[in-house]
Image (cartoon, rainbow, N blue to C red):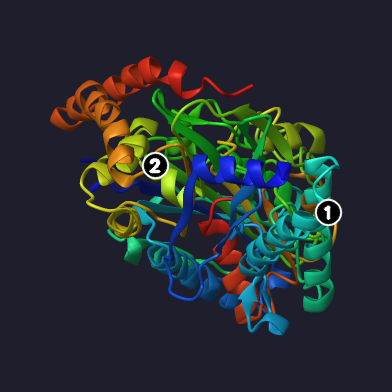
Amino acid sequence: MGSNYKLTYGVDLVFCIDVTMSMDHILDTVKKNALRFYQDFQVIMKNKHKNVSELRIRIIAFRDYYYDREQAMLVTDFFHLPDQAADFKACLTSIEASGGGDDEEDGLEALAYAMKSKWNTTAQKRRHVIVVWSDDGTHDLGFGKSAPNYPANMAADFNELTRWWGSRTSPGVMDESAKRLIIFAPNKKSWNKITDNWNNVIQYESEAGDGLADCDYEQILSAIGNSI
Amino acid sequence: MKNEKQSQAFHDIFDGQFVVSAEIAGGKGEDSFCCSRAGNAALIGVFDGCGGLGARQYDHYEKHTGAYIASRLASGAVYDWFRSGIQKGRHGDLTEELRERTAGALLLGEQKGGSALKLRGAMVRDFPTTAAIALAEYGNREITVQAVWAGDSRVYILNENGLSPLSKDDTHSRDAFEDLRDDPVQTNVLSSDGRYTLHTNHMRLQGPTAVVAATDGYFGYWRTPMHFEYFLLDTLRRSGSLSEWKEKLHSEIQDVTGDDATMAVMLFSFGTFENLKQFYADRCRELEQVYIQPLTDAYTEEKARTLWQDYRSGYERYLK
């Protein structure tokens, strides 16, 4: 009795990709990694006998509000995989690097958008994973506030964004048990501050995951797939 | 002469101990255990290397993960601690002694393995593992069981009133029922940085009792906590010998679990296997009639939650 019961996992992945001009030389690699990421994640969950009943992916391609205005934040709804795998691939491959202005980008705004995704709340067990690829640091929140399309309900500053992320004692907008943040970015503002201070975070220090060794990649996938 | 008497008395009460362990991936299991008996004391311990936090692989350890190595280092350290206490006796603070032993072993493991610093963040720890240890000692004509733990592996007492944990998970858990749905993050595990706490709880055994230490692979993949207790007693009911019970515990968990699963058991005051079966027969029937059958007939989360609330007060009776 009860022995034929298997828990199911609902997995949501949000890919935040820096698509400014400086990413041009590695954007194809990032796209390949993004495509590979969800497939390899499914394999690792299967190998651990974890039954993924629902898998969804959303893309947030980010630049700078100040310089790129309407092109600053390109977001999709969740793609349901495997049914919408072709649509997801088409969307991902259509992304091109452009704009960006100065070195730093609006990565924190992208992260804020990602946190407020409509996460799966119905699966028995859940993983809500945000993956960021960027080759540079971030502006302070609100740097691009003068842009007419800058979101009115954005976190005012890093402290508020930290509250949105939450902690074990003070949960934020995401499910504390399910949330994970994977950062492929250099050790620059504010990625380093996030890595040092937020829970459930892994950072691979590099330019958008460039030079990521297979063993490191497997470790990252295991870290997301397993309980912590 | 006094020692001989005490040993004889412990021997009369202590029926034996065993471990069952199942791996998800052969040869890569991240659980470990220790099990020993000496003089007037017996020890069981289970250790679940944290594959999420300790996913780093180490060349020095043939590409095994930090989690794989950590559980083995910790179980070895606890076993050595127990065996070394046989001659000189144990007089110090148990949790502090165990903390010192395990931290030393894990730090040595890290020094040999080297640290891999390409990955950073709160989800990355060197050599992380849970621990759930039960030490049974005879003194003043009674057996005292002391549970020591960190993380979400558990020590349970299984007696005439059913199954109840003696340990409390290091998670921000609401209760054992919700844990099965939430997959809560652990707030404290052993690791080579030494930044962890070992908790303790104890009780005096009264009457026939099984002491169980288990990793979450055994108890964490059921619909309700009642199903785990039923699994223990139903497999016992269907067994004709202790070895058959062990075989069922080992094989049948693999249809349920999504993780490596390890469980160690110590039995006290049953005398024979038939007595053991007989002792739990009524409890097994009660579980089946009150909780399991109604949920098998028509399962709903609401009904499961209601039945859990009924079961809960008994289940949590030893939690401080």
* Mark 2 surroundings within 10 Å by alpha-carbon count, few (fewer than 14), some (14 through 19), many (20 or more): some
- In the visual, does B80 lie left or right of B108? left
State the SS at label 1. helix
Q: Which mark is residue B298?
A: none
Q: Which mark is residue B271?
A: 2
Amino acid found under the numbered disc labelled 2: Gly
* Mark 1 surroundings within 10 Å by alpha-carbon count, few (fewer than 14), some (14 through 19), many (20 or more): few
**Residue B6 drawn at (x, y percent):** 65, 41
- In the visual, does B115 lie left or right of B29? right
Q: Which residue lies furthest to the left in this view?
A: B297
Q: Which chain carries label 2?
A: B
Which comes before the other along the chain, label 2 or label 1? 1
Q: Nearer the viewer, residue A14 or B241?
A: B241
Above or below, A133 against B280 in this view is below
Q: Which mark is residue B88?
A: 1
Using the rendered image of the protein, determine whether residue A86 is visible from the camera's viewpoint: yes
**Residue B272 drawn at (x, y percent):** 34, 44
Using the rendered image of the protein, determine whether residue B150 is visible from the camera's viewpoint: no
Q: In which quarter of the image is the N terminus of chain B?
A: top right
State the SS at label 2. loop
**Residue A10 drawn at (x, y percent):** 40, 47
- In the visual, does A82 lie left or right of B2? left
Above or below, B313 against A170 in this view is above
Q: Mark 1 lies on which chain?
A: B
Q: Distance between the residues labelled 2 and 1?
A: 30 Å
Above or below, B20 against B235 in this view is below
**Residue B297 drawn at (x, y percent):** 13, 29
